[in-house]
Image (tube, rainbow, N blue to C red):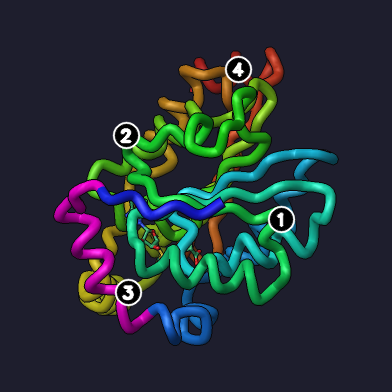
C-alpha cells in the first residue's frame, strides 16, 4: 500500500523533507555507525504468526525490510512524515520483493491513526519508534499515539539517543552540537514519560542503556499484576 496524500505539508514535514532529500541516498550507509541498538530491537521484536508490526518514522524502510525478511509470517507497516523518506522506503520494499508484506503511508506521528490508514482494526502487535522520538516536536503526543495503536496484548519498542550521563561533559556537548544539525534532541525524560504514559495503559517499561547511555532502549509490555504494583509504587 502506498499513497501520496495531497494535503498541505506542515512546517515540520518540510524541514524533514529538506533534511532527507539528499541524505536518504546515503542514510543507511552512514547511520549504521551511530544509530546503535536498532538491530537488537529488531531481534527482540518476535511478532506472533500473522502478527502486524508498525514502525512510526520508518525512514528509508531499512528496519521494515530487515524485520520482514526475518519474520516471513508477519506483516509490516511504516508511516513517516517525509515523502522523501517514504519514496526510499517504497523502493527498498520493492527491491527486496516484499511489497506484499511491507506497506507504507504518510503520517505525522503526533496524530496519525495508523489503524485506520492500514485498516488494522484490532491494532498492531508491535509498534516501533527507532531514533524518531528525538526528532518529533511533540514527542510525548507521538508516544501516547503510538501506545493507542497497539492491540490489547501489543508491545511497544523504542530505541533512541540517551543522555550519555556517565560520559565526560565535552563528549556530551560535542554530540549535542552535532545532533542539532539533524534537528535531533535526545529526550532526557524518556524513561519517566514512558512509565507515566505506559502505566496509564497497563504497560510496564523495561529500560536498557546502550554504550554508557549513548542510546536507550525501552520495551513497553502488558504488565502482570505484580509488575503494575511495582510501577505504581516506584
Ligand atoms: C533518524 S530517522 C530514523 C529512521 C528509521 N526509524 C531508522 O531507524 O532508520 C527519523 C525519521 O523520523 C521521521 N519523522 C520525524 N518527525 C516525524 C513525525 N512527526 N511523524 C512521522 N515521522 C517523523 C523522519 O522523517 C525520519 O524518517
**Where in the figure is residue 150, as x and y percent of width and height?**
58, 30
Task: Categorize mark 4 by other alpha carbons within 10 Å: few (<14), some (14-19), many (20+).
Answer: some
Question: Residue 125 location in percent, x, y?
Answer: 67, 35
**Front of the two marks 1 and 2:** 1
User: Is 163 part of what is drawn in magenta?
Assistant: no
Disc 3 to disc 1: CB gap under 8 Å:
no
Q: Secondary structure at mark 2?
A: helix
Dividing the picture into quadrants, the one containing residue 166 is bottom left
Q: Which mark is residue 141?
A: 2
Where is 116 relative to 224, above or below? Answer: below
Magenta stretch?
7-23
Give how far apart the Cα atoms at labels 2 and 3 are. Answer: 23 Å
- Secondary structure mostly taken by the magenta-highlighted segment of the chain: helix
Q: Where does label 3 land, which residue?
A: 20
Report the disc number at residue 100. Answer: 1
Q: Is residue 102 shown left or right of residue 207?
A: right
Relative image position of residue 180 (x, y in whole percent): 22, 70
Q: CA distance from mark 1 to mark 2?
A: 31 Å
Q: Residue at x 60, y 14 (%)?
A: 229
At label 3, counting other C-alpha atoms closer than 10 Å, the crowd grade (few under 14, some 14-19, many 20 or more) is many
Is ligand 1 less than 8 Å from the beta carbon at label 3? yes
Residue drawn at x 44%, y 86% is: 26
Q: Earlier in the sequence, mark 4 or mark 2?
A: 2
* CA gap, disc 3 and disc 1: 26 Å
Amino acid at each position: 500500500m502506498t499513497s501520496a496524500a495531497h494535503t498541505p505539508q506542515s512546517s515540520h514535514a518540510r524541514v524533514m523533507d529538506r533534511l532527507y532529500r539528499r541524505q536518504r541516498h546515503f542514510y543507511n550507509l552512514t547511520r549504521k555507525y551511530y544509530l546503535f541498538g536498532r538491530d537488537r530491537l529488531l531481534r527482540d521484536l518476535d511478532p506472533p504468526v500473522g502478527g502486524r508490526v508498525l514502525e512510526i518514522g520508518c525512514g528509508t524502510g531499512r528496519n521494515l525490510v530487515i524485520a520482514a525478511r526475518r519474520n516471513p509470517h508477519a506483516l509490516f507497516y511504516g508511516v513517516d512524515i517525509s515523502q522523501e523518506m517514504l519514496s526510499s522506503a517504497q523502493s527498498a520494499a520493492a527491491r527486496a520483493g516484499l511489497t506484499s508484506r511491507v506497506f507504507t503511508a504518510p503520517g505525522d506521528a503526533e496524530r496519525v491513526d495508523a489503524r485506520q490508514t492500514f485498516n488494522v482494526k484490532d491494532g498492531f502487535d508491535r509498534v516501533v519508534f527507532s531514533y524518531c522520538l528525538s526528532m518529533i516536536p511533540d514527542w510525548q503526543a507521538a508516544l501516547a499515539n503510538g501506545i493507542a495503536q497497539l492491540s490489547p496484548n501489543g508491545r511497544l519498542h523504542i530505541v533512541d539517543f540517551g543522555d550519555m550521563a556517565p560520559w565526560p561533559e565535552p563528549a556530551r556537548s560535542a554530540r549535542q552540537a552535532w545532533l542539532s544539525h539533524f534537528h535531533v534532541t535526545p529526550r532526557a525524560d524518556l524513561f519517566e514519560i514512558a512509565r507515566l504514559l505506559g502505566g496509564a495503559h497497563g504497560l510496564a517499561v523495561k529500560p536498557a542503556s546502550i554504550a554508557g547511555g549513548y542510546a536507550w532502549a525501552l520495551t513497553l509490555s502488558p504488565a502482570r499484576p505484580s509488575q503494575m504494583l511495582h510501577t505504581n509504587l516506584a
